[in-house]
């Protein structure tokens, strides 16, 4: 419920129990309420998750940056670098917002954890991190002003050293529809004694397990999807993968990143099997849009670059002004939707698996002949399914979710016309489609493989709306 939930010693919320595949445990805001979580003092993580089958949804988490100075944070770093062990004091300068798993011997290797619809900001440590976990979904969050004073090189959103909870090679980690702004580092990373990271989003080291060296241990086998994110004005990159294989970075928008450490807006570094497709990279003045890949399996295609050095141009990449609605580094006023004259419109790859089925606000792709580049799909004023209609959601409830066999649909009471339902997989392929009479209440999804799906609902009077469900 409404309230300010705080701690000065240990996590505000410490989740160690687990749900089941049939029954996730969900911690969420009561409808109509806006609970806030704060942490300072001897707190390393405001929210710590070491359980599996967990959902955290709808919280605002506020860090203690306003009460920390650079001078004091640097003094703490210097003390620790010289062998200090005053950990209860150091915690105040390294507090993270939400931490899944962790770099600890006693970590429980959590899996199937979802963080959604949260606002995470002003933490001296990282915003949202997943370390030694599997099946992590981080979606629809706003993550800003994090990482400023920590000595461990944090970022806005990071996935580090995921572990193999099974042998699946499909999408297991998903980072989508997030806005990441003004995350940066100002204190050196204690391991390297220099500034590092402060990225909007980083997919970090999955070629070997935590604590191992290159070539040691089993590499991570699952894929990671990074789509529809907007990352701007971060000290590190907007988005990048580092020593991380099997990553798809698709339909993202990056602007004015690398303000502290000079990283490119979106790039891949020492990786294999990484696809960077349908993105927009608008560099800061004198900055880099991307960098030259070291492997032929690091693929760039159908991206748009502007205002900075282009280290490598892939197939169908272009250099042009994307023409955003309002170019700004101010989170409150920036608008990265496309003007109708934007060269990014209808210029994305339409190949299966190379574009997002819906954009950051739920608009189905493509609206034109091909999908657009970037996180937002342009919606013409002449298209009846306007953004406001698409976001209305038509008062539809899907349950149970996750589902095994029968997915029930509860529509608005006034629905009297047949409606169409398309079910799409995470690659954007339609796997089930049917027209349904208004009195129909269930969909049979028993034949679908386990995984995450999008349900696109077309209603005559309500327009188009998009929902997510998990098939067990």
Image: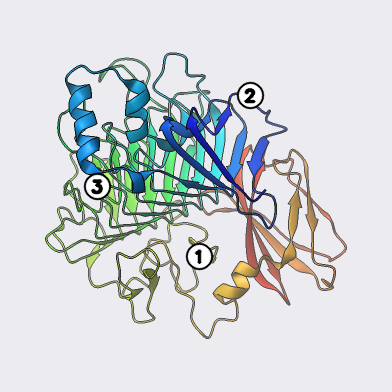
Gap in angstroms between the C-alphas marked 1 and 3:
30 Å
Answer above or below: position of 169 versus 372: above
Within 10 angstroms of label 3, few (less than 14), some, or many (20 or more) residues?
many
* Residue 86 quadrant: top left
- Image disc number at residue 17: 2
Sequence order check, earlier mark of 1 and 2: 2
Q: Name the residue beneath numbered marker 3.
A: 236
Gap in angstroms between the C-alphas marked 2 and 3:
35 Å
Sequence order check, earlier mark of 2 and 3: 2
Tell us which disc is closer to us: 1 or 3: 3
Image x and y of residue 329, in percent: 30, 64
Image quarter (top left, top right, bottom left or bottom right) of the C terminus: top right
Left or right for 295, reference 6: left
* Residue 129 quadrant: top left
Q: Name the residue beneath numbered marker 1.
A: 365
Q: Residue at x 45, y 51 (%)?
A: 353
Question: Depth check: 78 or 237 in front?
Answer: 78
- Image disc number at residue 275: none
Tell us which disc is closer to us: 1 or 2: 2
Image x and y of residue 338, in percent: 38, 74
């Amino acid at each position: 419920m409404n309230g300010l939930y705080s701690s000065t010693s240990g996590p505000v919320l410490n989740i160690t129990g687990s749900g089941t595949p049939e029954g996730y445990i969900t911690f969420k805001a009561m409808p109509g309420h806006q609970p806030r979580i704060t942490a300072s003092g001897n707190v390393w993580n405001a929210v710590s998750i070491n359980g599996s089958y967990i959902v955290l949804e709808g919280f605002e988490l506020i860090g203690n940056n306003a009460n920390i100075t650079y001078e004091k944070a640097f003094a703490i770093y210097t003390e620790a670098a010289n062998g200090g062990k005053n950990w209860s004091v150091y915690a105040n300068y390294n507090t993270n917002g939400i931490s899944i798993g962790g770099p600890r011997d006693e970590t429980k290797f959590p899996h199937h954890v979802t963080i959604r619809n949260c606002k995470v900001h002003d933490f001296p440590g990282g915003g949202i991190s997943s370390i030694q976990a599997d099946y992590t979904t981080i979606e629809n969050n706003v993550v800003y002003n994090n990482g400023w004073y920590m000595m461990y090189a944090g970022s806005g959103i990071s996935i580090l050293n995921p572990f193999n909870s099974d042998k699946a090679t499909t999408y297991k980690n998903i980072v989508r529809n997030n806005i990441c702004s003004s995350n940066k580092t100002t204190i050196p990373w204690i391991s390297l004694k220099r500034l590092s990271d402060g990225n909007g989003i980083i997919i970090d080291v999955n070629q070997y397990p935590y604590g191992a060296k290159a070539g040691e241990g089993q590499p991570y086998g699952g894929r990671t999807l990074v789509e529809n994110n907007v990352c701007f004005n971060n000290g590190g990159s907007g988005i990048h993968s580092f020593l991380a294989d099997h990553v798809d970075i698709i339909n993202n928008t990056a602007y004015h990143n690398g303000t502290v450490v000079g990283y490119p807006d979106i790039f891949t570094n020492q990786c294999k099997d990484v696809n960077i497709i349908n993105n927009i990279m608008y560099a800061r003045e004198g900055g880099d849009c991307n960098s030259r890949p070291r492997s032929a399996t690091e693929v760039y295609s159908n991206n748009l670059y502007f205002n900075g050095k282009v280290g490598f141009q892939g197939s169908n990449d272009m250099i042009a002004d994307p023409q955003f609605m309002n170019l700004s580094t101010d989170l409150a006023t920036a608008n990265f939707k496309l003007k109708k004259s934007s060269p990014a419109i209808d210029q994305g790859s339409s190949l299966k698996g190379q574009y997002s089925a819906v954009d950051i606000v739920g608009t189905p792709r493509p609206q034109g002949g091909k999908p657009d580049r970037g996180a937002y799909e342009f919606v013409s004023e002449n298209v009846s399914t306007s953004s406001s209609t698409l976001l209305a959601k038509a008062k539809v409830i899907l349950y149970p979710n996750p589902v095994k066999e029968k997915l029930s649909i509860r529509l608005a009471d006034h629905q009297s016309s047949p409606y169409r339902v398309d079910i799409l997989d995470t690659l954007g392929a339609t796997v089930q489609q049917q027209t349904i009479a208004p009195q129909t209440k269930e969909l049979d999804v028993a034949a679908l493989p386990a995984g995450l799906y999008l349900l696109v609902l077309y209603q005559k009077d309500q327009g188009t709306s998009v929902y997510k469900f998990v098939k067990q």
